[in-house]
Each structure stands twice: as structure tokens, then as C-alpha cells.
Image (cartoon, rainbow, N blue to C red):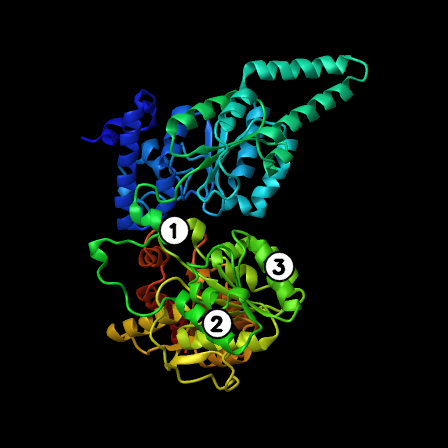
Amino acid sequence: MGLLEKIRDYSSLKDLSPDEMEILAGELREMITSVVLKNGGHLASSLGTVELVLSLLRSFDPSRDKILFDVGHQAYAYKILTGRMDRFDTLRQWGGISGFPKRRESEYDHFDAGHSSTSLSAALGYAKARDIMGNKHHVVAVIGDASLLNGLAFEALNYTRESNTRVIYVLNDNTMSISPRVGGFATHLARLSSSSGYNWLKKAIKDSCASLPRGQALENVLGKLKDHIKTIVKPLNIFDEMDINYWGPFDGHNASELEYVFELAKRYDRPVLIHVVTVKGRGYEEAEKNPTAFHGVSPRSASTGPAPAGKTWSEAASDAVLEMAEKDDRIVCLTAAMKCGSKLDEFASRFPDRFFDVGISESHMVTMAAGMAAGGLRPVVFIYSTFLQRAMDQLVHDVCMQNLPVIFAVDRAGLVGEDGETHQGLFDIAWSRPVPNLCVTAPRDEGTLRELFETGLQSGSPMMIRFPRGRVPESVKTSGPLSGGTPGNCLSPEVVAAGEDWVLFGYGRTVDLMLRAREHARESAFLPLPTVVDLKCLKPLPVGELREMLTTHSFAIVAEDGYAEGGAGEAIAAFAESIRGEAPADVAVLGIPDIFVPQGKVCEQDEYCGLTPGNVVKIYAEHQKRAHRQAAPLEGAR
């Protein structure tokens, strides 16, 4: 039996010797690596924070103290040691534990996270709640150096002084991006700042100065002297300038040093930022050599079989834009720390002066793109649907209100799988459709993806091209645009399969769902077979073509790749009602219900939400039964 199995949870950590702590760190890394390589997940970040987590759990009690992890990429060891060891092999699986902190999952997870840079603001909120309610526990926020660059984190830093509360920030720096180590001065200053004698002397001087004539002036002089001494013994940094006492940097893999610093911080009476330096991917050679590639990994279990053939949607989108950029030097690409995820490495290599990775700064990126467009460029913003939510105001005010030609390549739209609730791309349609000047589209295959990018480039107005996670399907042939459409206009809906009586509207990923539903109806001898239409453009709605379909079919089903409420189906149903006198078709909407969809495989999420071929056919069958029941009394009357 290994040491980890004997320890079970954090409560026994204080009994371990330094040698046992080192053994335990190794066992934690083994467990994290084996599970993440099997299930997928965020590997390098969690491997780099094992000693940090151990030190936090030896210094603080998470049943009382509030430990908040930013994003949660680095919290796997924390999950294992706070009662989830036996379930850790279910990480990111359907019905298993989340890859991110979840309050409903454990009493030790104090704040849900999935998007970056929320921890400092949440920690200040927790600290003020503690103060107002008269409690004494500690509040600790662990934030990475990349997350610290986001505007939300800087807003929290800016307010920290005004909050007038005790809070501990731990900056986990795995790139040495702030300042070099300054040897023993870091420990010395932390010890000095937190000592009871220093704090007593500081309070005594303050109280004495207040009672003396011109006492405040003397206190100011002493304060300036203290600041002058600090500039001599350690480099200037933004945290001290914001009146947040800065300690560090410290070795993030030296548990004894970290525990000593944490004990000092617990006695400190003001906000403090503890800077620790870690190695991303620590203990796993491949991850240490290439931490970017091992930040997030896909499952490697034998059961997954060979890698699927064909391009991913991300690769197809980046290839399309790269080809366009070869011919048009106005095209530039922007991403918010997702160059690899959005497959933009080749674009960045081919056009380094036209590629911009702004870090985790989505709002800044969108407004920067707006400025580029106003200046004559044709920016393409590559961004995951879930992260575009963080720049909604900029999309509305800075891009669409000015009708600027920015293309949004919205990756990971719809259900995304194992990342779960915080990363589902289910909101973008509902909140983007009401925005004036914005065209919202969804390609069904690589051919339509390229057509939409070319249309967006020529448009002169903002366009959103949303596509799902996963592989691009084979080309889906159509019968061409509907009779009411404009030939050659790639925004016109197309008939993918001709039928009668009922019509199935899909877009993007749901076109395939509707084709499989048609095949399910055929295999079940359920006649007549439906017409299948690819909408392609969700805003503005193609009302002419919709009128044609709704007047020539008795029933329509719209499959949403997002929430049913606020989606394209709701708009089509409203349009059908507005032409009720001329259109016989009733409209049913099949989309994501009013829930946050948990992690799991996309097929499991589809089943959970009812996005299945069988359910499509079932909806039509139920409509037919209702129609027969309503027709029966009329037949009897005749």
C-alpha cells in the first residue's frame, strides 16, 4: 500500500516528515498522470502545483479556511486530498467529478471556476463576508501568472487596498514572468513584515504620531523611509505600488519554505501577495519539455482506438483563413491565449506581423480588432464560444454598433464534452441574434465553412461563424438553394434531402442530426420521409425561404445547437405564427433545455438533452397522433 492510500485526505498531512512529503508528492503525480492520460484533462498545470497544494493543506484547514483556485487547472491534487481520491478515476466523465472546482461537488470547493481570473474578486468577497459576520478564518486565492494578466484580476488588485481586509493571494508563476529570485531577502522581508514585534511597533508609531503636533507629517516621513528601504532590498513591483505587500519569489516545489511563508502570512494583518515559482508539468518529462502541449490533453486509453481521420473544425477554419491571408494582406488573426487550441501555429509562423496573441484578455482583443477594422484591416477573431461571453459588451458597442468588418471564428460552439458546464458553447446564439448589424452563421462542412469566411471578408459588416468541437464531417451534398433563395448566395438555406409533409431544419452540427433522423424514419418504415433543410444563416433569418417551407409542409422541427430558449427555432416558430393565415405548419423546437449540462462525452450529453434521431421522429409521431385526434370529431360530424 502506497503512502497516498494510507493518508486518504488532508487531515493527516501534518504528521508527515519532509521525506514522506516528497514520496507523497510523487504518488500524487503518478495518480494525476495516469487518470488524465486516460480521461483527458489539464495535466501540466496540476503536476506543477503538487507541493503548493500540499503546503496549503498543511497550513490551512479547508473545512474552515477558504482556498480558491483560479480556473481550477491546478487543483487536481487538491481534489484527491479533499475526499475525492476514490472517485478521481471518474474525472471529467459522465456522472463523475468535474475537472474544475464545483461547490456542489465538495464542501472543500469554495467557488466554482472554469473561466480565468475570478479568484481574486471572489476572495475579496469572501473576506468581506468574513469581516462583516465577525469570523476569523483565512481566505486564500491561488492564481496563475497568465490569469493575472486579465482585466478582471487587475480590477480586483486595484480594489484590494480599498477593501481594507485581510486576504492572501498566491501567485503561481511557472514562467518567471514577473521578477527573478532575490535569495534570502524574500524570506527575511516576509518574516519582518509578519512579525508581531514589527506590527506592534507599526501600530505604536501610528498611534503616537496621531497624538503629537504635526504627527501625521512625521508618520508620512517614516512611511517614506520604509518605502525607501524596501526599494533598496528588493525590486520595485506593481503589487507594492498598489499597497499589496509582495513576498517572493519562493520555490514552489519546496514545501517547507512554502509552509513557513504561509504561517507568516496567517499572522499578517494586511493583504499580501506570495509569489511562488513552479515548473509546469513537474515530474512528467514529456510535460516538462512541452508544457503547452500537455496543458490540456485528450484521452489516450487503449479503448479509444486509432485517431479519427480528417481535419478538426479548428484546423479547417485556420486553413481557410490562411489561404485567404495569402491573397489579401489586410487579413490579420487574433486570439486570446488559444493559439494552439485554435490551430493557428502555422498562421503565426507564416505571418508573424499579422498574428496577435493578446493573452487571457478577450475584451481587449475584441476592441483591438474593432480598431484594426476601423483602420482598414480585416481582422479574424478566433475565440471559443464560452470565452466570447467575456467580451459581449465589446462585440456590441465596439464592433456591431459601428458596423465594422470583424469576422468572429467561434470555435467549440454547442456541446463540448468533458470540460462540462463552464465550457459549453450554448449561449452565443441566444445573445448574438438580437444584435443589429451582426450576421450569425453556422457551416455544415468544410466547403460551407470556406464559403462563409469568403463571404465575411467581402461583407464589410461583422459576421459570426460558429462551428463545433470535433472533426469536420464529409461534404454534405444538397439540391441547391430553395426556390425563394438567391442563386450563388451562400447565406441562403439549402435543401439537403427532399421529402414531404414535414420539414427538419438544422444548422451546423444539427444538419447531421436531422439527416440521421430522416434515415431513422426510413429504417422504421415511418413515412412520409421529411425534407431536411440546412439553415446556414441564423441571423438575419431567411424569411422568404422559410415562408416557402412553412406553407408547403404541415409540421416543422428545428434542432438547436444551443439553448432552445432564445434560439433560431424560437424565432422560426414566432415567424410561423405571424403568417398563420397562409402557413399550415406547426413548429417544434428541439434544443438544450433550461439546465447547465454536466461533463461527459458529447454523445452522452446529446442523449441527456434529447438531441437524438429517435426523439426527432418521436416528436413528429406525437404531432401526427394529435392531428388525428383533432380530425376525428370533424369526421364524425360529417
Q: Which residue is mark 3?
A: 367
Q: CA distance from mark 1 to mark 3?
A: 28 Å
Labels 2 and 1: the sequence-earlier one: 2
**Towards the viewer: 262 or 128:** 262
Q: Residues within 10 Å of mark 3 (few under 14, many from 20)?
A: some
- The residue positioned 55% from the left and 59% from the top of the image is 431
Measuring from the top left, give residue 136's x and y in whole percent. 52, 21
| Looking at the image, residue 463 lies above or below residue 301 | below
Give me the disc on residue 101.
none
The answer to whether marks 3 and 2 mark residues whose Cβ atoms lie closer than 8 Å is no
Q: CA distance from mark 2 to mark 1?
A: 27 Å
| Looking at the image, residue 124 lies above or below residue 465 | above
Q: Amino acid at mark 1?
A: Asp
Q: Amino acid at mark 3?
A: Thr
Q: Which residue is mark 1?
A: 419
Q: Which residue is mark 2?
A: 321
